[in-house]
Amino acid sequence: MPQLIEKRRSLNKEINLQLQQNKELEARLAKLQALANLGTISAIVAHEINNILMPLGNYAQVALNNPTDLPLTEKALQKTVHNSARASEILESMLAVVNGEAVEKRQCRLKQLVEEVFSCIGREFEKDSLKLKIQIPDELDITAVPVQMQQVLMNLILNAREAMMPSGGTLQINARRQQDTVIIEVSDTGCGIQQENMDKLFEPFFTTKTPEGPAARVGSGLGLVFCKEIVGSHGGAISVESKPNQGTKFIITLPI
């Protein structure tokens, strides 16, 4: 009997030691996860700032290149001011998301949001042999944080544009109401995605963009991560359909 009691005591001591070690490991893991989250957040913010700064630089260059064309210069500067203010809104909204803060959603016209995205991008798609087809009902509303949903659309549109460069193609944006949801589809006729990469698209830092690829640059692998995070925060879902050399379609489903 004394031996049995001693074994129980030894076993209890070992269990308590393991529990203490587990708690210490969990605490260390939480700290490491917080640092990893901070790194991901910083990278996402940098990625989105780059998307914002590119059209701003284009507008400023137009103004510099045409100092005597006052109407054109004024228009370029107005767009620069407008998009600078919008960039500030986007960054504030992004920081609120990554900090877990609640951001107010409101009803907004989807077609207007899409038009503003193209206004922010600045460069006309026709100049790159790209055709644009938009089929969105004028009265179709979504409930969203406007700047967040615009940033999702901008990411998808820029990805589609790069997938079709330099040979050109067609970018199509369709939207419709289906029962209690709104379906938004952003599709292109570009290079498509290899089957082995389909399950990795929404993983942080995974990218198919290389200097040798259609984009002619290395991607950050964070644009689609951001899209998934934002769509999820709106109670929706995002999926993708694609085949190599047959284009890609991203499908966003949002509750009414």
Image: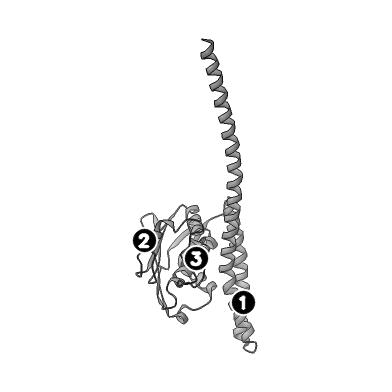
Nearest to the eye among marks 3 and 1: give it: 3
Note whether residue 91 is visible. yes
Circle 3 packing at 10 Å, graded few (<14), some (14-19), many (20+), is many
Nearest to the eye among marks 3 and 2: give it: 2
- Tag 3 near tag 1, CB within 8 Å: no
The reply, left or right, for residue 101 in relation to residue 190 is: right
Q: Residue at x 53, y 14 (%)?
A: 5
Tell me the tag on residue 155. Answer: 3
Q: Secondary structure at mark 1?
A: helix
Tell me the tag on residue 195. Answer: 2
Residue beneath disc 1: 78
Residue 63 found in image quarter:
bottom right
Nearest to the eye among marks 1 and 2: give it: 2
Farthest residue to the front: give it: 3
Q: Position of residue 187 (x, y in %)?
A: 39, 68
> Cα distance, mark 3 to mark 2?
21 Å
Amino acid type, residue under disc 2 in the picture: Gln
Farthest residue to the top: give it: 1
Q: Position of residue 41 (x, y in %)?
A: 58, 56
Q: Secondary structure at mark 3?
A: helix
